[in-house]
Amino acid sequence: MARSGRHSFCARLVESRHPAGRNRFDFGIIVGRSFPKKMYRQRLLPVFLLMALLNLHAQEQHPHARRTGLALSGGGALGLAHIGVLKYFEEKRIPVDLVAGTSMGGLVGGLYATGHDPAALDRVVHEIIWDDIFRWTPRFEDRPVVEKQEWNRVTGEVTVRFGKNLSLPAGINPGQQLALLLSRETIGYADDQNFDDLPTPFRCVATDLVTGEAFVPDHGPLAKAMRATMALPAVFTPVEWENKVLIDGGLVNNLPADVVRKMGAEKVIGVALETDPVDSKKLNTLTNVLKQSVAIAVLQNERRNAKLADLLIEVELGSIGLLDFDHADEIIRRGYEAAVRSGKELEKFSVSEEEWGKYQEARLQRMKSSPASGELVEVKSEQPNVQKDGAHELMRKSRGGTSESELEKNLTGLTASTGLPSAFYNWRFKDKPGFVVDLERRPDREMLLRPSVFDQWSAGEPNRFALRLETSGMKQNAYKSRFLTDVLLGYDPGARFEYYHPFDGTAYFVSPGLMAERLHIASYAGRQRTDFSRDSVGGSFYLGAGTWRYVQARLGFRAGYDSYSSLITVDGVKAKDTGFVDPEFVAIINSQDSGELPKQGTRVNSIAGWSFRNHSYPYMKLDFDHFEPLAKNFSAFVLGISDSSFGRKLTFYDQFTSGGLTSMDAFHYQEFHANTLVELGAGGMYRGLNEHDLQFRPYFAAWYQAGRFDMGSKGWQTHHSTSGGIFAPTPLGLAGMSVAFDEDGRARFRLSLGSFWNRP
């Protein structure tokens, strides 16, 4: 008990309780025992100084009186509505001091927190190629050239990933393009970033699969945190964060009003996305029931958190779906309109022009920007072998400096050629400034299975149906090394295996292989067709250069044994079962955007060698085509084949054949057997028919070819083929129907499935 009985005022820090339950510290005035006047002033001086410093800090951080937090909900494409809300806020001078988001709300909120204004957000959304973001596998042009050889060139669009013991993956999309997008738009904010130091303090919500709890990172790699909050279950693979396995935060907290409150917001504005109720008649399939079950769980946690917001803006989006990114403009407009409807309630959050200017200036001062180009200074990976080889290759490709766009191109090619899940990049300001790359580790050994179906039918020709299973297998700690397999079941059954092993991140490699196949060969006499077959077993060994996208050269040999169904004689040359050794040089160029039906790019496959066998001969094979887009929906193309034994007569089984789709279409499959042949052609492809219908998008093509053939004792012959057809992509491959006319006007109709080419 104090000795003096006089009362005076003494300031101290007291704790008050906010109605919503959070703690807030205020400076209060209490009544207490008096002190001598001089002592009173001495005791109060430090307190008043502390008050002044805290007030100055608050003014620097938040030039207006009240801290306003914004909570943005998840919802796929629907989350683009947040941009419209932010646009209204900017027009009405409503500052956002704190922001938290989940899933797409985390993407929009995170970009806004780094300094993107609504106009910049709108630009980002319209520059994104959403099909690439949700693509299951790398684009064909980004795949390594080793997967574009003539024997294993991918023509189908379906890829199935398997893990250890053929287990299914944790998600169908590793999220590489999303990782690059987030790296690009958040570059400059370090991997050890404190999220409170962003232009606007930020949080995002992810779900930890280990504990089942919400995880809200407050520091670390910003792009990776945003990738985690968007990891849609079964769509994107989870994100590993220390000992956590993270997926989309919508499962536990789709509207993080509580998170914003914990960040220190005095007032919280929530933005919720509303759609039409589900049609009960559609809840009759397994997938729809599962989707609705997840949607109910998300809706329930969103409703609970909506009650924690001081103001809730509800965006009515009707029947627009979670993946309707092509409706971006309409979604953004509806977000703006929802904010307009809440305009009266939002008026109290608006500040004066002077306060708005200070708010904008405070954000601007905290923004970071990085150079458009610079040195690559570090490549990181948890896997030592991947780190060593990846650093060697990326440093070699970035020697002398690299631009941001060139680095992204290299990372896209690297992840496609290595099978690594994804790669992030950032700019380091401290120590040695430059780009830093983080390669995500491959969680286990992996196998990619790419099935495709092939068939062609035309009167008088054999049924050539084939099921093709092409695989690529990689060990967990491998860099680019892989086991390649191609299995054909059907008309020409066979299997081929190759182990492809690049050396230490260089462009050089070695590739031994094995093969066994049966090849059918048709011979025509008028309307009569006779079928023969050649069985081959053997192996191969090559050394080469070219482990990236477009170009590869290899030198080596094939060796094995050929046996024939009938030992026939042509032009005095008799076919005999024989062993063979074929030293050869192989060159591949492929910059096309599809193995099924390209819009643009060049493909060249060429082989030159000497076949040592019972009847030896030199050979050269060249197969090429080039597609050039001339308009949005129209491409012109040229194609050609040139095969030669340089004047030496060949056995029936070794002769070069022609006839079939895009190889003199007006004639039977393998109608021409020649010691040398040359074909050239040109045409056009129109893709504008029904272009907005994803279910059926027909293409129309027309082309002309001329061929010159050395038919041995029959002499040289020249033939012409003029073709037209309609083609459409299907899940099983490209389906087509065509008609072709020869030089005498005879027509040949052809149905095809699987490829625009005359092969599986």
Image (cartoon, rainbow, N blue to C red):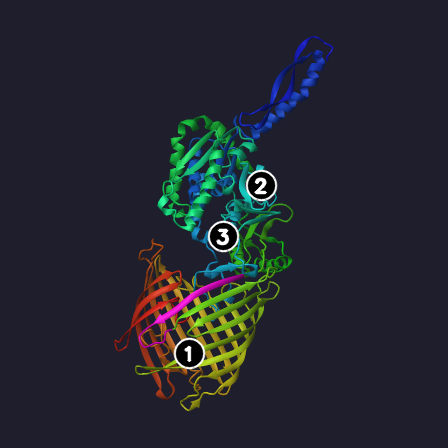
Residue 46: image location, x then y, percent? 68, 22
Is residue 442 in the magenta section? no
Residue drawn 39% across the image and 41% down it: 331
Q: Give the range drawn in magenta.
A: 447-463
Instruction: State which tag comes first along the sequence, 1 or 3.
Output: 3
Instruction: State which tag comes first along the sequence, 1 or 2.
Output: 2
Tell me the SS state at disc 1. strand
Instruction: State which tag comes first along the sequence, 3 or 2.
Output: 3
Residue under circle 3? 177
Judge by depth and name the residue closer to the eye, 741 or 486.
486
The answer to whether 356 appears left or right of 731 in the picture is right
Residue placed farthest to the bottom in the image? 572
Residue under circle 1? 520
Work out how far the residue at label 1 is from the one at label 2, CA to CA, in angstroms: 62 Å
Residue 732: image location, x then y, percent? 40, 63
Circle 2: residue type: Pro
Circle 1: residue type: His
Residue placed farthest to the left in the image? 745
Residue under circle 2? 217
Work out how far the residue at label 3 is from the one at label 2, CA to CA, in angstroms: 22 Å
Tell me the SS state at disc 2. loop
Q: Which of the image's four quarters has the N terminus?
A: top right
* Mark 1 surroundings within 10 Å by alpha-carbon count, few (fewer than 14), some (14 through 19), many (20 or more): some
Residue placed farthest to the front in the image? 284
Q: Which of the image's four quarters has the C terminus?
A: bottom left
The answer to whether 661 appears left or right of 489 in the picture is left
